[in-house]
DNA sequence: GCTTAATCGAGACGGTACGTCGCGTCTTACG
DNA sequence: CGTAAGACGCGACGTACCGTCTCGATTAAGC
C-alpha cells in the first residue's frame, strides 16, 4: 500500500500536507462541510495538485483516514473463552464508531454512496468484510475447538452480533454502551457447550 | 397533524408535489446528491415556493421521509408460534427493502441524512422504532405467554434479528434471501421452551 | 384629467395612499431603488390593488409626480422684452431639473424607456412638447410683434435655447448655472431688432 | 491602457466577448433591462467569470462604453469656411446617431446609465467632451482667425449647435434631417464677419 | 553543473446550486 | 365589488465550489 518508488520527494510532501489538512478539517468542520477548496487553502497545496493525485473529496478523505492511523488497525483479542474474546472485539468496535477520526464515522456517507456507485459498493463490502474478519475467525476457532456447536453459521452469527450495535448506531440517538456488550453477547451467542 | 383550515389549496398542492419529487429523488440519487433546485425542477414547483415553506434541504427531506412513512403500511402477522410470526415479519422486511415504493428502500439515504441533520436523526429514530414495534410486540407477547424466557431483552433481540438483514443489505452485494430467514431466526431466537 | 365619477371612495383612498408612499420613497431612495413591493409595504395598500390601478412602476411614478404638484405647473412669464421672458423660462427649467420631485428628474429614465417602447416615446414627445410650448409661444409672440425677425424658425430656436441646458444636464457633471442663462440667451437669440 | 503582461490569453478573450455582448445588449434593450445573466448567455462567458473581472453591472457597462468609444473614429472636416465645416460635423453626427454600430446610437442607454452610476457619469462626461472636441476646435480656430467674433463662448456655442439635434433625437419622433442642417447652423452661428 | 522534464502555485475557465428578492399573476376571505 | 393578505411561477441576483485548464516558476534527475 505505501508508495515504494517515490522518486520525486515533492509528491510525497504535497501528499502529507494535504492529508494533514484534511484530517484537521474533518475534525473541525466534519465531512459534509469539508471542501477541496478548503483543503487546498489550508494545506498550501494548489487545487490542481490535489486533483492531480486524488479524484474526489471522498478519496482524499478516505486516504486521510487511512493515513491518520495506519490502516485502522485491527487488534486481535488474546486467546481465552469465546465469550470474552467476542466482548473485547465488540467493545473496540463501539469505541471506533464513536471516534471521529476512524473510518467508522464515515459509515453513513459510505452506505449512501455505496447505493449510488457500484465501485463504492465493492469498497464498502471489502471494508465491512475486513472489519468483520477478526470476529468471524474468533468464532470459527471456537467452532473448531468445540466451544461452539460445529454446525453454527459463523458468518450470520457475526452479523447478528454486530447488527444490533450498527442498528442502534445508525437509527437511535443512544448507541449501545460498552457496558451493555456482555448482555448482548450472552443473548446472541449460543450457549457454550459445557 | 394534517392542516385543517387550509385556506389556499395551492399550498397543499405544492406541498404534495414537492414531497413526492423529494421522495423520488432520494430513492434515485440519495440525500447527498439531492438539491432544492432538482426538487423544484422535478416537482414543477418554483424554488422560491419551496423556500417559502421549508427552510433547508434537511427540512424538506425530513418532511418527505415522514410523508412517505405515513403512506407505508405495517402488517401484523396472524397469531401463531413466535417463530412463525417472526419469520413472517422478517420476510416482509426483506421484501420491503427490495420494493421501490417502500420507505425501506430509502434507508441508505435516510442513514446519511440523519448524520447531517439532527431533525432527520430524530425522525429516523422514530421511524425505526415504529418499524420495529411490530416485531417487538410479537416478542413481548411471546415472553408474556411463556413461549420465550420472560427475562429476555426483547428490544435487543429485535435488533439482533433485524441486524444481520440490515448489515447484509447495506454492506454486502448479496442480501439475505427470503429462504434463509428460518435459519436466521433459529440461530438467534432463544430456544422456545418445550 | 381628474377622475370624475369616483363611485367607490375606497379606490380614491388607495390611490392617494399609493401616490403618497411613492413620492416619499422617490425622495428617500430614488427611482432606481423604488419597487412596487416597497410602495405596497409603505402605503399599506396590497400589491394586487396597486397592479389593479397601474400597470407598471413607471406609471405609478409618473402618476405620483403629476399628483405631487398638480401637473407640473408651467408659469408663463409676465409680458416684457423677449430676452427677459426667455431668461425667466430657462431659469425655471433649470430649477425644475434640479428638484427631485419634478418630472424633469425622470428624464434620463424616460429617454431610455422611449427608446424601447413606442408608447413611452409618444408620451415623452408629448411631455417635451408641452414643456416647450410656453417657450415657443413667447418666441412666436415676439416674432409676430416684430421684436424678432418674422422668418425665424421658432421651433428650432426653442430647441437651440434648451439644448445646451439639456446637454450639460445629461452629459456634464456641472449643469448650466442660473446666472449663466443671460449669456446663453444673448448668444443664441438673434439680435433684437432695434 | 492596454494590459501588456497578459499572461493568460483567456482573460483578454473573455473580456472582449463580454464587452461585445454588453454593447450589443445595450443597443438592443438598454441599460435598465441589461442583466449580467443576459451578458453571460450572449457572450458565452460564465457568470462567475464576469463577476471575477467586474464587480457590478455598472462596471461592465462602463467598460463596454469605453471600449466601444475607443473603436469609434472621429473625423475632422477639411479646412474651409466655418459654416461649411460645422455643417459637415453636424451632418456626420446625425449619421452616427442613426448608425447601429456607432457609440451615438447607445446614447439613450448611456444617459440612463450615467444617472445610476457615478462611474458611468464620469465616463459619459469624458466621452461627450471628446465627441464635442472636434466641433469646439473648429469654432476656436474660427474665433482665432477672426471669422467669428473673438469673444464668443465656443463651448456654449457648440452645445447650442448640437443641442437641437439631440433634443429632437431624444424626444421627438422626427429627428433633424440632414438637409435641415444648413438652416440650423445659419440660425445659431453668429453672423460671420464680412 | 546543466539541461530537461516532472511538478508545482496560482488562478482563470464554464458550470451548478445556493438562498434571496422582486416581479406580475392568482386565489381566498372579509367588509 | 374592492380590498388585504399572501401563495404562486419566474428570473436575476451575487457567492461558493466544483473539476478542468493553462500558465510560468521551481526543482529534482540524469546527462
Image: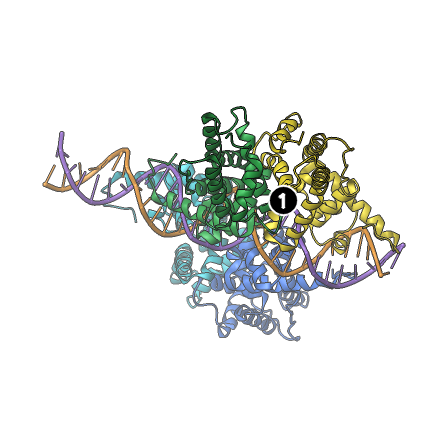
Chain colours: A cyan, B blue, C yellow, D green, E purple, F orange
Looking at the picture, tell me which residue is in the foreground, C127 or B153.
C127
Q: Nearer the viewer, residue A144 or C168?
A: C168
Name the residue tied to disc 1: C109
Left of B23 or right of it: where is F30?
left
Q: Residue C168 appears in which quarter of the rendering?
A: top right
Could you say where residue A192 lies in the image, as x and y percent from the top left?
48, 60
C134 to A108, vertically: above or below? above
Q: What is the x, y in percent for residue C12?
A: 84, 50
Residue D193 seen by the camera: yes
Give percent across and percent down for residue A128: 42, 57
Image point (46%, 48%), residue name: A92
Is B113 left or right of D10, judged from the image as shown?
Answer: right
Residue extending furthest top? D151
Find residue B151 and report its horizontal and vertical position in percent: 63, 59
Q: Answer yes or no: is residue A185 visible.
A: no
Q: Chain of mark 1?
A: C
Label 1: which secondary element = helix
Q: How many marks?
A: 1
Neighbourhood count class around disc 1 (C-alpha, 10 Å): few under 14, some 14–19, many 20 upward: many
Nearer-the-camera pick, C125 or D105: C125
* Residue closer to the observer: B4 or C181: C181
Q: Residue at x 44, y 55 (%)?
A: A82
Amino acid at each position: 500500500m505505501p508508495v515504494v518508488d517515490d522518486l520525486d520527494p515533492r509528491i510525497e510532501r504535497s501528499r502529507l500536507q494535504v492529508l494533514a489538512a484534511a484530517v484537521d478539517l474533518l475534525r473541525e468542520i466534519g465531512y459534509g462541510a469539508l471542501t477541496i477548496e478548503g483543503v487546498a487553502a489550508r494545506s498550501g497545496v494548489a487545487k490542481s495538485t490535489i486533483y492531480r493525485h486524488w479524484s474526489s473529496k471522498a478519496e482524499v478523505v478516505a486516504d486521510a483516514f487511512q493515513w491518520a492511523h495506519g490502516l485502522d488497525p485491527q487488534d486481535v483479542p488474546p486467546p481465552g473463552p469465546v465469550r470474552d474474546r467476542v466482548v473485547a472485539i465488540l467493545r473496540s468496535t463501539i469505541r471506533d464508531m464513536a471516534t471521529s477520526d476512524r473510518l467508522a464515522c464515515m459509515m453513513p456517507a459510505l452506505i449512501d454512496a455505496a447505493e449510488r456507485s457500484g465501485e463504492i459498493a465493492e469498497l464498502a463490502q471489502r471494508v465491512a468484510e475486513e472489519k468483520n474478519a477478526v470476529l468471524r475467525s474468533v468464532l470459527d476457532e471456537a467452532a473448531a475447538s468445540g466451544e461452539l456447536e460445529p454446525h453454527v453459521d459463523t458468518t450470520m452469527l457475526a452479523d447478528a452480533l454486530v447488527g444490533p450495535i450498527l442498528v442502534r448506531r445508525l437509527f437511535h440517538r443512544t448507541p449501545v454502551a460498552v457496558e451493555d456488550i456482555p448482555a448482548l453477547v450472552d443473548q446472541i451467542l449460543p450457549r457454550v457447550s459445557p
